[in-house]
Image (cartoon, grey):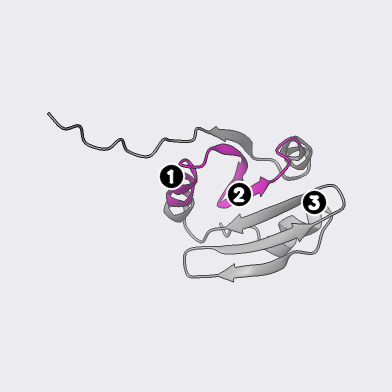
Amino acid sequence: MAPAKVEVIAGLTGCEAKIRLEADELRQGVCHTPEVDYLITTFPKEEYQQAWLDSAAIYGGKYLVGSRWIVSAKEPEMLEEFRTRLGGTIQQLRGRDPAPAPSRS
C-alpha cells in the first residue's frame, strides 16, 4: 500500500503544501495557515519513518503519526484536529539530553 502523498494530506488539512524536500527516503511539504504552520512528511518505507522518529526523539515534541506519514506542528494542540481528519495517532517523543562528558577518575 502506497503512503498518502504530501499534497493529499495537505488538502485534507485545508492547505496547499509547498514541497521543501524530496529525497529517496522521504518527501516533506510545509503548510502555512492563519492558525498554524506545520510540516507533512511521507516515507516510501516504514523503516525510513522509524529512523525519522528516532532522530526526532532527541528534540521531543508531539507528532501525528500515520501509515508512512507524519505531521508536525508548531502548535501541537492542532494535531488533535488534524487527527479527526487524517486518522493516525498522536505520539509524544521525549527529548534526550546530550551524552554526558566522560568523568575523570
Note whether 4 is above or below 78 in the view shown.
below
The residue at which mark 2 appears reads as: 70
Residue depth check, mark 2 versus mark 1: number of the one nearer the observer: 1
Disc 3 target residue: 13
Q: Give the residue type at disc 2.
A: Ile
Residue 21 location, quadrant:
bottom right
Residue segment shown in magenta:
50-77
Q: Which mark is residue 54?
A: 1
- Residue farthest toward the front in the current orientation of the protein: 104
Q: Is 43 on the left or on the right of 39, as rendered? A: left
Count of marks overlaid on the render: 3
Q: Position of residue 6 (x, y in %)?
A: 67, 61
The reply to whether dot 3 and dot 2 touch (C-beta < 8 Å) is: no
Q: Residue at x 66, y 55 (%)?
A: 40
Q: Residue furthest right?
A: 34
Q: Are marks 2 and 1 in contact (CB under 8 Å)?
A: no
